[in-house]
């Protein structure tokens, strides 16, 4: 026997999508940080490269979701880096002190690099559980010129985090 097929017009059924797609942003919550480097006498600054004692602070990575492959971060000066090799950042326009900058150090007290191309991978993140973490850092005043004048000494740095 032979088999014959009958072809008719194509049958279509409408497909309707309702609602909107849901995208989940994989990121941690990082609150702003205010670091008080304290009050210092001008006679503490004995010459270029003199520093004040280091002040510990943490960048908090709160409520990090599970499922990310990694967390990378970098810190950029909002002002200029006056001594880039030492990660010393210029004071901002609200400052009245002169002759000093702010130096950023890692948790062990070594110079923490600043700016583009200095991204570091945060090694403490657990992709299975997520969680909250801290990145320990230090900062201090750093004498940048022979003379120091007293006054307010402020600067700002920006923390950028990349999660994937």
Image (cartoon, rainbow, N blue to C red):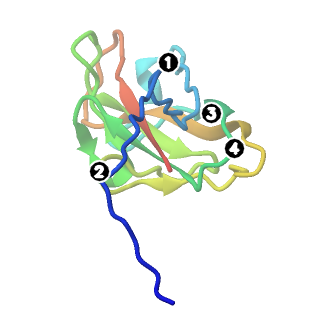
Q: Indicate which disc residue 66 carries.
A: 4
State the residue position of label 3.
Answer: 61
State the residue position of label 2.
Answer: 116
State the residue position of label 1.
Answer: 40
The residues tagged by marks 1 and 2 sit, at their Cα atoms, a distance apart of: 32 Å
Mark 1 or mark 3, which has the lower sequence index?
A: 1
Residue lying at the far bottom of the rendered structure: 1
The residues tagged by marks 1 and 3 sit, at their Cα atoms, a distance apart of: 31 Å
Q: Residues within 10 Å of mark 3 (few under 14, many from 20)?
A: some
Mark 2 or mark 3, which has the lower sequence index?
A: 3
Q: Residues within 10 Å of mark 2 (few under 14, many from 20)?
A: few
Q: Secondary structure at mark 4?
A: loop
Q: Residues within 10 Å of mark 1 (few under 14, many from 20)?
A: few
On screen, residue 6 above or below 114: below
Mark 2 vs mark 4: give the one in front: 4
Q: Secondary structure at mark 2?
A: loop
**Which corner quadrant of the image does residue 31 belong to?**
top right
């Amino acid at each position: 026997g032979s088999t014959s097929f009958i072809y008719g017009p194509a049958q279509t059924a409408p497909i309707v999508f309702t609602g909107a797609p849901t995208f989940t942003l994989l990121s941690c919550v990082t609150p702003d940080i205010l670091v008080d480097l304290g009050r210092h006498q001008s006679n503490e600054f004995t010459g270029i490269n003199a520093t004040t004692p280091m002040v510990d602070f943490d960048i908090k990575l709160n409520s990090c979701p599970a499922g990310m492959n990694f967390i990378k971060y970098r810190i950029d000066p909002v002002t200029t880096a006056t001594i880039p090799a030492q990660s010393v950042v210029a004071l901002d326009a609200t400052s009245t002190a002169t002759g000093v900058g702010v130096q950023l150090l890692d948790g062990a007290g070594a110079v923490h690099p600043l700016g583009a191309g200095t991204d570091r991978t945060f090694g403490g993140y657990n992709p299975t559980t997520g969680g909250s973490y801290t990145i320990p850092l230090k900062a201090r005043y750093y004498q940048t010129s022979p003379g120091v004048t007293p006054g307010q000494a402020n600067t700002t740095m920006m923390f950028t985090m990349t999660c994937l």
